[in-house]
Image (cartoon, grey):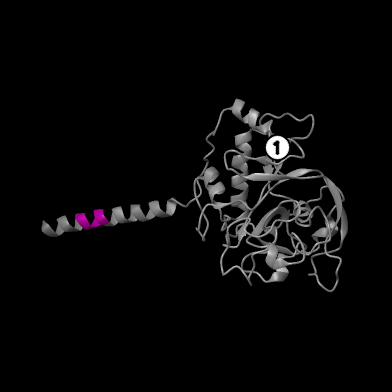
Amino acid sequence: MAGRYWTTVLAASVGLLMAWSLAGHQADAFPVNEWEPLRDSASVAAIAETLHAGAPWREPTSGMAFVWMPEGCFRMGNANSEDRDHDEGPVHDVCLSGFWLGQHEVTQGEWRQVMHNNPAQFRRGDDYPVERVSWDDAEMFIGKMNRLYEGRLLFRLPTESEWEYSCRDGGHDVRYAGGGDADRVAWYQHNSGGSPQRHSSRAANHLGLADMSGNVWEWVHDSYRGDGYSKHGRDNPVWAGETVYRVIRGGAWNTPVAAVRCANRGFESFISKKPDIGLRLVVTLPKKGENRGRPSLKDLPL
């Protein structure tokens, strides 16, 4: 009897230990189907109406700050044949509509306000970029934001052309986001101390965008292809071919300085979760004449 008693106690203890361990892992897991409304439709409509082309905007649920990127045309790609990777050409004309872009990379605090978890490896504070998120995780985050705003505002990852245009101060011929001095504008292998740093702790570029060069790589919408630029049209191009790879831009805290160039392109599998990859978002308004109620398939991100 005594042996059976202690066997029962031991089994119960092991069960409790396993439950405690599982709860600890689930604390950082991504919630599934967590689409609870964060405010009523009238409040959503009122917030959406505060967004006006040409003006900055702060999203109240997450706290994300957005900067207006005016429409414009530029020469995308790297024209310097002696200082470019094979996938940075051909140089081609691109024209973009205006959009809002995140002033800095999505932070751990902003992510947690929406997703109620923190997937980052380097948990040094709410003002540090969220990382260790896959492209699919980013799409889950975006889906939740779009659900919140019922199609009145549209959140998505930037296209690769939007990202480069913004990094290059509106399409100017600059090497890094903010000029030619990497140490002034970027956290990278040489100066980061081996980890991501607090957002906006290096100089912003001339459009007011921080960390476009360095800190963490940023997912963009496009699928990766080495000759992807040859597939671009002129107006608002995006390449979304059937491949497991997605483009990342900007370099990171653990990359050499060449990787933080505005023209540099990287890529990873859409399921990759790494401590040097994060994201920043674009916001747009529905096109003129479109219903600003719940999104249809054609209204969803590119």
Where is the N terminus found, in terms of image quarters? bottom left
Task: Give the residue displayed 63% in from the left and 48% down from the top.
Answer: 139
Vertical order, 225 against 154 (above or below): below
Q: Which residues are magenta?
A: 9-13
Q: Quadrant of residue 46?
A: top right
Task: Give the residue displayed 86% in from the left and 66% down from the top.
Answer: 79
Task: Give the residue displayed 52% in from the left and 47% down from the top.
Answer: 112
Q: Majority secondary structure of the magenta segment?
A: helix
Q: Look at the image and say whether residue 120 sits in the magenta stretch.
A: no
Question: In terms of depth relative to the viewer, which is nearer, 128 or 42?
Answer: 128
Of all residues shown, which one is farthest toward the bottom?
A: 82
Residue 183 in the image: x percent, y percent?
Answer: 68, 67
Vertical order, 265 against 207 (above or below): below
Q: Quadrant of residue 70?
A: top right
Task: Give the residue displayed 75% in from the left and 51% down from the top.
Answer: 207
**SS label for mark 1:** helix
Where is the C terminus found, in terms of image quarters? top right
Residue type marked 1: Leu
Q: Is residue 293 left or right of residue 230?
A: left
* Residue 23 seen anywhere in this rendered image of the structure: yes
Residue indicated by mark 1: 297
